Amino acid sequence: MTIRRPILLGLAILLVVLVAAPIALLWLQGARAPAGGGAGEPSPSEVGPTDDAAAGPLEPGDIAWVFAPWIFAQGPGNHYVLQAGTLADPAPLVDMEVPWAGDPETQVGRVPAVGRAIEGTVVYVADDGAGTAIHRLQIRADGGDEVLAEMREIVWSMAVAPDGQHAYLALVARDDDEHDLGVVRLALDGSGELREVMPPSRPRASEPAGMRLAAIARFGVDLMMSAEGGHLLRRTCGAGACTIDVLELETGEVIDLGQREVMGAAGGVILGSRCTGVRCFAEAINLATGVAQELPFQGEAGITFFDGRAAIVYIEFGPDGGSVLRTLDPFDGETRDVLHVDEGGALMLSPPQGDLRISMPAGYVHAAFTTDIEKGGAAIPFTDVAVPLGGGAVIELPAPPIRHPDGLGVQG
């Protein structure tokens, strides 16, 4: 089944030529519409090396998704909807409401603390305004739901290790939601063991030389795990600035990256973006050496962990006027072309989109393409695909069968 994402023409072009938005910001899931091309529509060309072994068979049931939109009408929100399933399911396997007390006017940027789908489970946080409970739920019909820990503090943000062994919680005082209490690690083995791993952060009150703030930021804290689970990133805003620090989980060392935005992390490399008073650019930061190198592209980018190393994936215009998805090894600079669409077509990466999280298996990148960017009409149909980085044909993906909380029915 072919599922397309309608994107306005101007937005589609901008997505191809601009650096991706920082991961700490929230993306909204776009509406999707059925494709019009059918089985006869051309598919993107494969231009990766032919001597690489193709990735193993991938089925829609191998790809799990989690959808957790915060629902509020007027005044403070009091719950969010939690849905989850796989791309093979015609409807969500999990569909429930979770208590979530928060005020969108004062807690700017705070969203439901929900992890990605890992080994058929999802870790999520419930908050009734008086206390917090961290749960783990099995992603299946009538799946078990266990409470892993309870506390009085607010869990502002959460990141779950990719091996499913620990969750990292950014805590804030219940009686003062701008009082940072640091980050704790929660064991997910049922013991409920908690251990502090990062002290409260101290955002800078003034910007360093060469930096220019676009706006005054309210307090907020967001966590992100590197793709392979070796580093925990914390972005803290307050006192007019947002700063990044990184915890190396094996040694406990905390690395201060200052004021920059981050798009992802993997294998000891941070993919970030930085602006001076003149321009903005993407950069790769080697955490072992502290060296930051400006990257030789201006398109949409992301980072993943493949074949034991960090791999930066990005999109550029091809020599024939089409688009090319490439990988870049940030250590030796080697680039490889992975996917190509001919002139008249376009590619874009599909990053985590706010309250929707799609868990791609190792070795695959989630992307979308169109073969006719100038097709008539107000919207351009894009087809979602899983792209094997090790070579092989792309795999067309159906849309997650989300039940929209606004009553529009099931997507997909």
Image (cartoon, rainbow, N blue to C red):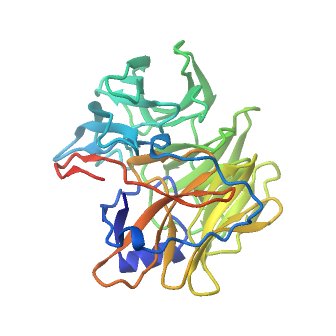
- Give the quarter of the image for residue 70: top left
Q: Position of residue 268 (x, y in %)?
A: 74, 48
Residue furthest to the top in view is: 191
Q: Residue 122 vs residue 187: left or right?
A: left
Residue ranking furthest to the front? 40
- In the image, 53: left or right of 332? left
Residue 205 relative to residue 312: left or right: left
Quarter of the figure that contains the N terminus: bottom left
Depth check: give the residue in front, 203 or 120: 120
Q: Residue shown at 37%/38% (left/top)?
A: 84
**Up-down relation of residue 59 to residue 132 (above or below):** below
Question: Residue 355: horizontal and vertical position, in percent?
Answer: 38, 48
Q: Tell me which residue sits at (54%, 21%) in the image.
A: 188
Residue 357 location in percent, x, y? 44, 46
Q: Please, is residue 195 above or below residue 365 in the view?
A: above
Give the x, y percent position of residue 322.
56, 82
Observer-nearest residue: 126 or 238? 126
**What residue is rendered at 46% in x and 77% in y?**
371
Q: How many marks?
A: 0
Residue 311 horizontal side relative to residue 167, left or right: right
Q: Is residue 204 visible to us here? A: no
The image quarter in which residue 175 lies: top left
On screen, residue 96 above or below 21: above
Placement of 358 over or under 92, stated as above or below: below
Q: Is residue 182 visible?
A: yes
